[in-house]
Image (cartoon, helix red, strand yellow):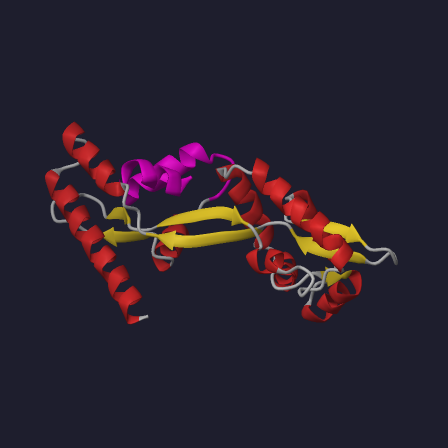
């Protein structure tokens, strides 16, 4: 909810956030300070005091890019990754069929993040990323704290992350149909937001100039880090 508002406005007074969140999320308790600290720690926002302004201002400086992607390493050669050769074509067709119909949505992204936030699901997901595994391989996850493997597999199945294939001997093979990509990005679109707010006089020139300076510093820091890498 916060990110969507930041995307529209770019800058929000800290004192205004709590009032707005309480109005939008009436049924739950909100720890605003913890939320703001988390967003700052993850480099989504910066909190700045500007002389003459009655409240600290929070500026959006980072955004998320999220979408499903094909499990590239698996589909390059599923046989080398553990799938019997006679199931290879069926698996590739399933991946192709899924992505032929796939359209990224915020609802789908949140649904995937919700299940991957579960440590047991994430542990299983990490096992499935580099290899196609049998039910015997999955049993090894119990040593890593995955107690209810059946429940984890159902969550991955219900979100169309995996498919299960049966070979001639009755062995089940669990294959990742889609991987998930998430990255912090520099929100270039905010330049248009700032221009609109300037045209509409919805923010003072002082605030918008400060915002441009913050975004410039953020962008240069990102480029400097990329260069050093």
In the image, 35: left or right of 135? left
In the image, 44: left or right of 144? left
Point out residue 121 in the picture as x, y percentages from the top left corner: 64, 57
In the image, 130: left or right of 67? right
- Number of numbered labels in the structure image: 0
Point out residue 118 in the picture as x, y percentages from the top left corner: 61, 55
Residue at x 36% of width, y 59% of height: 41
Quadrant in which the N terminus appears:
top left
Residue at x 75% of width, y 53% of height: 87
Residue 155 visible at all: no
In the image, 110: left or right of 226? right
Looking at the image, the residue that sits furthest to the right is: 169
Q: Is residue 78 above or below residue 54?
A: below
Q: Nearer the viewer, residue 63 or 176?
A: 176
Q: Is residue 159 magenta?
A: no
Point out residue 93 in the picture as x, y percentages from the top left corner: 67, 45
Magenta stretch: helix, strand or loop mostly: helix
Quadrant in which the C terminus appears:
bottom left
Q: Nearer the viewer, residue 124 or 13?
A: 124
Q: Is residue 90 above or below residue 102?
A: below
Q: Nearer the viewer, residue 24 or 172?
A: 172
Query: Magenta span covers which residues?
Result: 1-29
Residue 111 visible at all: yes
Point out residue 79 in the picture as x, y percentages from the top left corner: 69, 62
Residue at x 40% of width, y 49% of height: 64
């Amino acid at each position: 909810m916060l990110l969507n508002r930041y995307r529209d406005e770019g800058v929000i007074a800290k004192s205004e956030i709590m009032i707005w969140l309480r109005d939008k999320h009436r049924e739950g308790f909100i720890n605003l300070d913890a939320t703001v600290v988390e967003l700052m720690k993850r480099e989504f926002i910066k909190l700045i005091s500007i002389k003459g302004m009655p409240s600290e201002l929070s500026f959006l400086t980072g955004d998320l890019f999220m979408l499903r992607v094909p499990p590239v390493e698996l589909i390059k050669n599923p046989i080398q990754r553990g799938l019997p050769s006679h199931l290879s074509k069926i698996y590739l067709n399933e991946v192709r069929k899924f992505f032929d119909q796939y359209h990224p949505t915020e609802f789908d992204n949140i649904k995937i993040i919700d299940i991957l936030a579960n440590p047991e699901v994430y542990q299983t997901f990490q096992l499935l990323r580099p290899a196609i595994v049998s039910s015997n391989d999955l049993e090894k996850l119990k040593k890593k704290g995955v107690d209810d493997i059946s429940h984890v597999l159902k969550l991955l199945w219900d979100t169309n992350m995996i498919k299960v294939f049966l070979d001639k001997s009755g062995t089940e093979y669990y294959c990742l149909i889609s991987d998930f990509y998430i990255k912090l990005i520099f929100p270039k679109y905010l330049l248009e937001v700032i221009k609109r707010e300037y045209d509409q006089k919805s923010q003072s020139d002082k605030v918008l100039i400060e915002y441009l300076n913050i975004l410039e510093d953020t962008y240069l820091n990102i480029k400097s880090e990329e260069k050093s890498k």
